[in-house]
Amino acid sequence: MSSIVLFGPPGAGKGTQAQRITGHTGYPQISTGDMLRAAVTAATPVGLEAKSFMEQGLLVPDQVIIDLIADRLKHDDAKSGVMFDGFPRTVPQAQALSSIIQISHVIAIDVPDDAIVERICGRITCGTCGTVYHERFQPVPKDGCSCGNYVESRRSDDNEEVVRSRLETYHSQTSPLADYYINKGIFHKIDGHRNIDEITSEILSILS
């Protein structure tokens, strides 16, 4: 079994590309956040262990996450391979992950910080139906939202200060991780500041 690691800063379009990669490869998308919530809800042994840390406001230890992933890899849909979304985040996590599965490709979607700030801070949501618009790239139609009852809504954390802080954290975490995978010869940096289909085409070319 081999696997793909996909990472990129918030607002880089990772979600769209993740869906396309899973559609092309058939690999299930593994998000540790989703797995944690599911394990806690299902009250599995690993889920209960994770819950004990979460209830204390503590980070769930890497080994618990790795145990969770090891359980997930036993499912039938993971036999051919999987795609990790947003994990690992640190070199120790990457080293631990390599002990249970072989990573074949690491895809990093790269977008300049200023472009990320523009993408995120320009987002507007219709508070009635949830349709997402953008001040520059997809403005609200002159006659309002298609739901007929447009109410402007913005996330409180969609502001430049918060976004740049998140980007700083992302860069500090992933820079050593990039070096780790570069040394293994499996790291691929993708220019994410262009047409969505062009990005997909390059990623699938690398994977093939």
Image: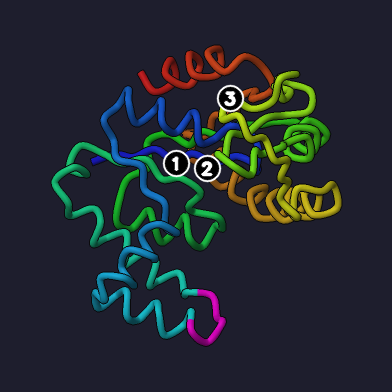
The part of the image, by quadrant, that contains residue 109 is top right
Q: Amino acid at mark 2?
A: Tyr
Mark-to-mark CA distance, 2 and 1: 10 Å
Q: Is residue 180 left or right of residue 79?
A: right
Q: Amino acid at mark 1?
A: Val
Number of labels in the image equals 3
Q: Name the residue beneath numbered marker 1.
A: 5
2 vs 3, front mark: 3
Q: Name the residue beneath numbered marker 3.
A: 146
Residue interval drawn in magenta: 55-59
Image: 20 above or below 31: above
Mark-to-mark CA distance, 2 and 3: 45 Å
Name the spot of residue 154 as percent of width and height, x first. 73, 46
Q: Contact, CB < 8 Å: mark 2 with mark 1?
A: yes
Q: Is residue 123 left or right of residue 208?
A: right
Foreground residue, 43 or 144?
144
Q: Is residue 74 left or right of residue 166?
A: left
